Image (spheres, coloured by chain):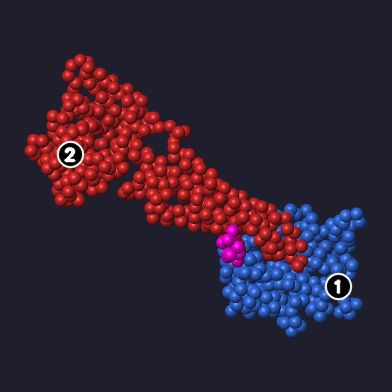
Amino acid sequence: MTLLSLEGVTRHVALPDRPPLEILRGIDLVVEAGDRVSIVGRSGSGKSTLLNILGLLDQPTTGRMRFDDEPVLLLSARRRDRLRALAVGFVFQQFHLIEGLTALENVQMPLLYGSGAHFWRRDRLARDMLDRVALGHRADAPVTTLSGGEQQRVAIARALVRAPRLILADEPTGALDLETGATIMDLLESVARDSHAALVTITHDVAVAARAERMHRLEAGVLSPAQQVAEVAA
Amino acid sequence: MRVVAATLVEALAQLRIHRVRVLLSLVGVAVAVAALTASVAMGDVVRQVSVESMEQSSGRPATFGFTVYSTTGESPSTDELVVEAEAIAERYDIRYMSPVMWLGGAVDLAGARTDAQVMGVGADYQAMHRLALAEGRWLVDSDAERLAPVVVVNRTVMDLLGVASVDQHPTITLPDGSTAVVVGVVEGAMYEGYPYVFGLPATALTIVGDEAGAFASPTIEMWVPEESAAAVEAMVARDLRGAFVGTQVDAYRQDYAAYFDPANDPTALMQQVLLGISGVVLLLGALSLVNIAVITVRHRVRELGIRRAFGASLSRVFVGVMLESVVGTVVAGVVGIMLVVLAYRLLLVDRVVPIGVTADLPPFPVAAAVVGLCVATAVGAIAGIIPALVAVRSKVIDAIRF
């Protein structure tokens, strides 16, 4: 079942006194339910813009995009917010946890914007999720007191607590050392698999990209499928 | 319900995170709300005390006085007047009626003849004039059947009698050698400094004896609902004229509401000045609140972006930021109001404004607390709009990029 599809998607940014800047050009991408997709690209290749579009944070300039078989370009901003709240979970390179809140409160945060059942059961759901990422014992610790690996695990718990059908991971190991990064990827893939969620990882790390079932390479705004690690690395 | 609860949870968490900033920014609001509440409360209390004082003197709205006298022959006796007035009151379902006789004269107090204000009144007089008792009881109709007449006095009389309490069974010696038993003591600013003795009309006449003179003829007071006041006045006057043919019947409304002009209320000016000062303090507090809130929101761009990424809609972010402001100012308002109530309970109000509260302080005006809370909420909402607009204008993509 197709969860997300992009067809001929472009993203231009208007610049004063200059031609529009083409960030993405003719992107075609299909993400099936439970898929494992990686997108590799250098800095400035348009990775973040593509992630924003996939996560319904940004809109394509042209092209067609369907999420859950709904035409995204025709949806209202409120409907896109709602869809994002119910179906998408983000994992960021810099974790982007909210300082001042505990690990538990950070994981509860997405549940404030979900359904009533999520909201009223937020404490139980968040604690269960922290247990799944082996951080149940640090639930009440302020996030600033956690190590980098622990913070990323909290971020993963936060991304998955609403059981999203699409997980978007932007450089999930970028701020971690090699060993912790591998552990985090194991965890992310394992939890995504258990949740039957599609995982789209955007990275410049070829080793991380190679863990996916399907790899893509993004270069100068153009996305192309890659069959082998060597192709990606090229 | 869920959205409101979730937004509140979010707002409380943010207030907790930024508690020091919130505390500092809300000091001004708390002080302003306290000043505003105090102004409203002070005005209300002064007005209430003033109204109660006027009611003690002239009766509660609407109180009518009826006098019946003859310019040519003999005026009706007190008994005749009271009997007829009771019949009229029963006819028109008037629940409060009292004869009132202001009798001057010397009274024997502990062996010394002392000038006093002796008043012949009925049992309903206490309710009609909002008389408060410091101790003992007021007069009742059945007191007329007692062999020993009873009186109610003020504290000045008690002091002259040299007794502290009615439990010591103080008495006043009457001109005929018998005694009247003191059963109650009235209190209030109106009854301070000069001896007052209240008794049923027959008792009052006995106390002053021959000195009653021309003032012995009572006024009949009736307290009626304001909406039917004019009709009742006309009917009672007509019936009295019919009952005492050939006499002159004067009817007049005597309570303060008949002549009190709210536009010239001296307490209103004081209250307006205090409200003006409070308003300026509130404005300054709100400006400081807006200033700090806008700066804080600019520093919260990343956090707001994260919330947007996890599904918070623009309206939710707007309401969330505004609610933080509202919750903060409401808490500050409650603190301010509590401080004012505390000061009020400690009787500081009587030291600031000498309103003549001698015994029981009137209860703190609930309206003042409600006004304070409403103003605090409104300030929070208005001061929250600007940072909320700044919050929704920040772009989520830019916010989560850094």
Cα separation, mark 1 vs mark 2, equals: 109 Å
Nearest to the observer: residue B182 or residue A111 = B182
- The vertical placement of B11 against B257, above or below, is below
Q: Colour of chain B?
A: red
Labelled disc at residue B244 = none
- Please provide percent x and percent y for residue B290: 63, 54
Q: Nearer the viewer, mark 1 or mark 2?
A: 2
Q: Is residue A161 magenta?
A: no
Magenta span dominant secondary structure: helix
Q: Is residue B19 magenta?
A: yes
Q: Is residue B75 in sight in this rendering?
A: yes
**Horizontal side of residue B161 vs B354, given as left or right:** left
- Amino acid tagged 2: Thr
Magenta highlight range: B13-25
Which residue is labeled 1 in the image? A42
- Please provide percent x and percent y for residue B359: 31, 49
